[in-house]
Image (tube, helix red, strand yellow):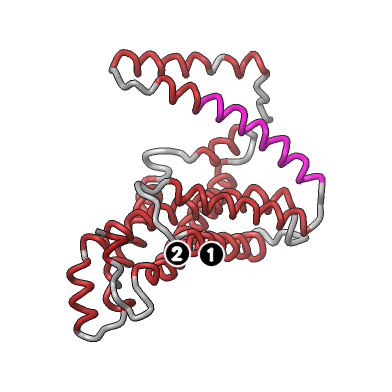
Amino acid sequence: MIIDPGWGDLSMTVALFAVVVALSVREGLSVEKDLVVATIRTVVQLFFIGYIIKALFAVNTWYVVTGALLLMMTYAAKAGLGRMKRPFPGFYLPMWVGIASGTVFTTAVVTGAVLKADPWYRPDVMIPLGGMILGNAMTGGAIAADRLVTEMRARKNEIELWLILGRDYRFAAREAKREAVRAALIPTINTMMTVGLVHLPGIMVGQMLGGVEPVVAAKYQIIIMLMVASCVTVASSVFATLALKRFFTPRQQLKHWLID
């Protein structure tokens, strides 16, 4: 049986927020304003998207579902780059292609082969799963982007040496690319190592609170963990492969003015 908290019940979570603010004040963290803004945005955005998704569920047409996911991908690419410490020119298209590749591939496998959604664009399956996959692909791409720039700066002498020896830019910067993809996967791997032992994922807990059998909830969580690993790997790999070229001139010379 699903427990539907009323508005009064929901308002009681203010107590949790008050504890966070009180501790911030006591410890001198100076993040009270950020916490208030973040909380307000969380409430507004989640209720807004809740009503939007409810409307999408009612519109059972492939082009509406596909269009919604494309819009989400466009925003995700921009938001992912916004997490970088310093903006880097020419990264938007590689980021968008990386996120789109990871999202489309993983969503197609999960909805088509695993869950066997019928029709394939079934909105109550495609939108939630697509959104979850897209969010993780964005995070993986953002981590890869930040790490790639860091590695290119740290390894510029090594890269220059390989170029002088006649190697192409792909070989010269291969270690930087590997480290970028590896860094993107670390949070996912850490979560997979401890899931079920250190913490129970929110989706699994939510399903059990909704009355789903624990074993069934565990099956869905396994699907989710593997699809997260898949989308992060594909998104970060595709991004790093495409973005690598942005560091070099057409004559395969390292663009020092971008990384110095």
Amino acid beneath label 1:
Val
CA–CA distance in space, label 2 to label 1: 7 Å
Q: Which mark is residue 115?
A: none
In the image, is residue 209 part of the stretch drawn in magenta? no
Q: Which residues are magenta?
A: 38-58
Amino acid beneath label 2:
Phe
Q: Which mark is residue 97?
A: 1
Q: Is residue 213 left or right of residue 122?
A: left
How many numbered discs sit on the rendered protein? 2
Per the image, label 2 sits on a secondary structure element best described as: helix
Instruction: Say if mark 2 contacts mark 1, CB within 8 Å.
Output: yes
Instruction: Name the magenta segment's main secondary structure.
Output: helix
Q: Is residue 103 left or right of residue 165?
A: right
Q: Is residue 72 left or right of residue 79?
A: right
Q: Considering depth in this image, is 173 or 59 the residue closer to the camera?
A: 173
Q: Considering depth in this image, is 236 or 113 the residue closer to the camera?
A: 236
Residue found at x 49% / y 28%:
38
Residue found at x 38% / y 23%:
31
Measured from the top left, where is residue 114 in percent x and y? 62, 62
The N terminus appears in which quarter of the rendering? top right
| Crowding at mark 2 (Cα within 10 Å: few <14, some 14-19, many 20+) | many
| Crowding at mark 1 (Cα within 10 Å: few <14, some 14-19, many 20+) | some
The C terminus appears in which quarter of the rendering? bottom left
In the image, is residue 43 part of the stretch drawn in magenta? yes
The residue wearing badge 2 is: 239
- Residue 16's place in the image compared with 225, above or below, is above
Residue found at x 39% / y 49%:
84
Measured from the top left, where is residue 162 in percent x and y? 21, 79
Residue found at x 81% / y 45%:
58
Q: Residue furthest front?
A: 257
